Image (tube, rainbow, N blue to C red):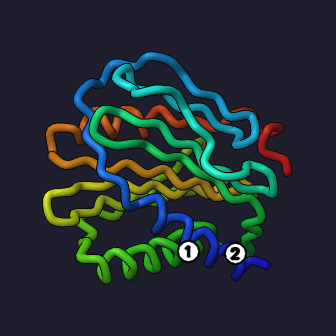
Amino acid sequence: MFKRSFVSAVLFTAALSVSVFSQTSSLVSAKFVSRDGGFAIDLPSNMDGGVRPVGDLNGGAGTYSWNVPDGSFTVGFVEGMHVSGDSFSVLNDFADRVTGSQSRTGGKIIERIEFSLDGDPGIQLKIRRGKINAINRFILARNRLYVLTADFDDSDGDDSVTAILDSFELLENRSLIA
């Protein structure tokens, strides 16, 4: 079960990491709350339309995407990530697989950071593909893997992209019980 969920999560992340994104404003228009996903995140003020669920949110996985003038943000989650042992080790293995997939598509990991979000382990990858920069964050909370993805075409957008990603927060623990 874990291997199938892990492989699904790797493929899920690779699919999320292909959009091109440019964030020109750090102003926040609203906070998006996903009860299904157990998270909240700020939405940029220069959104085109609203937040759209991608695919079927039933079955323990979901993806939300929203557009800005030159691209999109994506936040996804996959349930069923039962981990025995060191969670950072599992995330590092996951990040290694994503790194391999980026290398095959001409991407290069320029930064890899371990972090903690409210005590839950996380890994951030900054990726460069030609003139495209990307930030991918993976957070393992209880039995749920969260994948946050933003791609952007210049370094000027890095601070505003990071501010949106930094606004990601987990809802109360009882919301995360599957």
Count of numbered tags: 2
Instruction: Say if mark 2 contacts mark 1, CB within 8 Å.
Output: yes
Q: Residue at x 81, y 57 (%)?
A: 59
Residue in the image at 68% along x and 34% along y: 34
Closest to the observer, 69 or 177: 69
**In the figure, 165 relative to 44: above or below?**
below
Q: Which mark is residue 159?
A: none
On screen, 72 above or below 86?
above
Judge the density around disc 1: few (<14), some (14-19), many (≥20) Cα neighbours within 10 Å: few
Amino acid under disc 1: Ser
Kindly identify which residue carries mark 1: 89
Where is the N terminus found, in terms of image quarters? bottom right
- One can see residue 29 in this view: yes
In screen coordinates, is 56 left or right of 97? Answer: right
Q: Kindly identify which residue carries mark 2.
A: 85
Q: Few, some or many C-alpha atoms within 10 Å of disc 2 (few <14, some 14-19, many ≥20)? A: few
Q: In which quarter of the image is residue 157?
A: top left
Query: Is residue 72 found left or right of 26 in the rendered image?
Result: right
Tell me which residue sits at (15%, 45%) in the image.
155
In-image side of 39 versus 172 (left or right): left
Task: Measure the alpha-carbon separation of dots 2 and 1.
Answer: 8 Å
> Residue 114: image x %, image y %?
43, 60
Q: Of helix, strand and loop, which one carries label 2? A: loop
- Counting from the top left corner in percent of width and height, residue 97 is at 46, 79
Q: Which of 69 and 111 is in front in this view?
A: 69
Image height of 160 relative to 111, above or below: above
Q: Can residue 120 be seen in this view?
A: no
Residue type at mark 2: give it. Gly
